[in-house]
Image: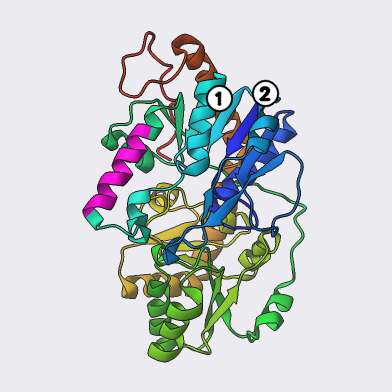
Amino acid sequence: MNIAVFTDTYKPEINGVITSIEIFRRQLESKGHTVYLFCPSYFGRETVAENVYRFPSTPYLFKKMSERRFVFPSLKVFWKLRKMEIDVIHSQVPANTGVFAILLSRFRRIPHVHTYHTLFMEYRHYMPVPRPVAVWLIEEISRRYCGRCQRVISPSMRIRRELERYGVNAPIDVIPTGIDIDPNRKITPESTIRTRHGIPKDRKLLLFVGRIGREKNISFLLRVMKMLAARRNDLCLMVVGDGPDRKRHLRELSSLKLELNKDIVFTGYVKRDEVFSYFKAAEVFTFASLTETQGLVLLEAMSMGTPVVAIDAMGVSDLLADGRGGILCSLNEEEFAAQVERLLDDRALYEQKVTEANLKAEEWSIERMAERLLESYSRARSDFRLNRHARFNKPRLHPPAPPLDPETEI
């Protein structure tokens, strides 16, 4: 099968959407399928790669979205795509390249699948419009865009229910990204990581990995660390990643207001391959985001045998509802700090969570999820042959194949 993936975000950016694209792409190619990627250019900062085609682009004008790209059409790229025998178009973001995907699907008569990665309602603070307008825009764009696809893929049941509330009438398949488990992955020694960041051997590492933005609720973790530092002196919180809040807001909060200079380390950007070494070096992975769609980073931590303490919120609760591999907490700093201490001080409990974390990571393998994705592609092609094309809010001549039934409430 030849698959054309359209995305508004790709390397050298680092985020969950790109991680999902890359994991699925490698797995599909290992099964003999060809994946063509259509994405933005980044003023020459990107590397040339096979089957990756770049649209000209520019950063968004408003500051809060300066990391994202506004993509322009390219006759050169479209001409190359015209010569490809594409079986399925798969869009990843309902923005510029997503519009290109819709148009190409219609004009070239190719079935279109869309993955709704992000619950945009939780990111409306980035939109330079009043809140009621942002809410209306998000629901309307989501409903209309998804309604023009043969199938929609949701990373979790929570997202699927939200799309159904918006009025999306396309079949919605629940397919999490899954975890790419590599037993031969090269791991940097813990001592090297500690030396690199000046962390003493007697400090136990708490870890956060992700985009350093408001939606990740990292300030909550800093306040938790302030509580822990008042009770004990053997902990250090390491914040791995970069984003708009790192250089000013969080550094000021940690050093000036909370006085945690010796207890917090901001690493900045770390290469993805090396992030797993940080997971391995940590005692506990801490996570306070309230806006996750599937909590892929939690699975990555668990794949390295690192248990999790996280806020019981969207995406994360789907993953840890059974209590295996980690502990869920309410949005309460004292409770969160207490659970971190409980996990660190109860060795039997800690070893149990480590074992559970490894087993859960294996259960959520990318091999299993890629098979479900291929089944969704096949159903999209079948729906397309019956209906010619998705028609937003128009009656279908034939009923589409029902959504894939998730084996669990993922």
Q: Name the mark on residue 1.
A: 2
**Residue visible at 41% across and 16% down in the picture:** 400
User: Is most of the magenta stretch helix, strand or loop?
Assistant: helix
Check disc 1 and report its element: helix, strand or loop: helix
Q: CA distance from mark 1 to mark 2?
A: 9 Å
Check disc 2 and report its element: helix, strand or loop: loop
The image quadrant of residue 216 is bottom left
Whether residues under marks 1 and 2 lie with C-beta atoms below 8 angstroms apart, the answer is yes
Q: In the rendered structure, which disc, 1 or 2, sits on the residue that comes first in sequence?
A: 2
Quick check: is 136 in the magenta stretch? yes
**Residue visible at 70% across and 81% down in the picture:** 196
Residue bearing the label numbered 1: 377
- The answer to whether residue 274 is above or below residue 111 is below
Do we see residue 113 in this rendering? no
Quick check: is 209 in the magenta stretch? no
The image quadrant of residue 58 is bottom right
